[in-house]
Amino acid sequence: MTTSSRTTTPTRRIAAGVLAAVAALALAGCSGGSRAGADQPGVDNTVTSAPGQPVKSSIMASSEKDLAASFRTNGVDDPEKWAQVLAQNKPYPAGTEGTQKIQQVLQQNQAEPEVVAQITTLVEP
């Protein structure tokens, strides 16, 4: 009886350790390689707005990856570049002054006029 209880305790400890290791690996696998919220393949990211009106993303509240995803979805050429440019020039003041700064930043980085117009319909300060 004493021999079997000594054997059971180390066996249970090993089994518990193995289960803990498997659980840790499973959790670690879930955390790596994630994509930004708006840029997940296979996820319906449709946000409804008034017909014909694009949904505006806040530059101040959005990550660079989320901005790029919005630009990509709406057909902006080189979405990663423009998302990076806008993100690097934060902060933007609210309202008209912020919109003017967005336009100015894009123009200073040689954005074509149609790209400036396209992006300004998709973002707000």
Image (tube, rainbow, N blue to C red):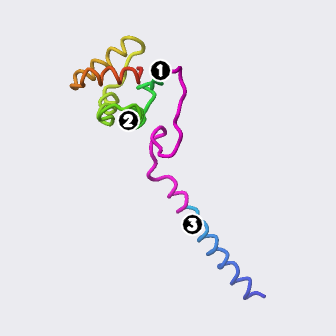
Nearer to the camera, 40 or 97: 40
Marks 2 & 3, CB-CB < 8 Å contact? no
Q: CA distance from mark 2 to mark 1?
A: 17 Å
At horizontal 39% and vertical 20% (from top left) the residue drawn is 121
Label tally: 3
Magenta span dominant secondary structure:
loop
Nearer to the camera, 27 or 8: 27
Q: Which mark is residue 72?
A: 2
Q: CA distance from mark 3 to mark 1?
A: 49 Å
Give the crowd class for mark 1: few <14, some 14-19, many >=20 residues within 10 Å: few
Q: Which mark is residue 22?
A: 3
At horizontal 44% and vertical 52% (from top left) the residue drawn is 33
Q: What secondary structure is found at the residue carrying circle 2?
A: helix
x and y percent of residue 98 in the render?
Answer: 37, 16
x and y percent of residue 110 in the render?
Answer: 21, 25
Q: Where does label 1 land, which residue? A: 53
Residue type of the residue flagged with mark 1: Gln
Nearer to the camera, 70 or 2: 70
Q: Is residue 42 magenta?
A: yes
Sequence-wise first label, 2 or 1:
1
Nearer to the camera, 71 or 58: 71
Q: What secondary structure is found at the residue carrying circle 1?
A: loop
Q: CA distance from mark 2 to mark 3?
A: 38 Å
Tag in front: 2 or 3: 2
Q: Is residue 40 magenta?
A: yes
28, above or below 76, in the image? below
Residue type of the residue flagged with mark 3: Val
Q: Which residues are magenta?
A: 25-52
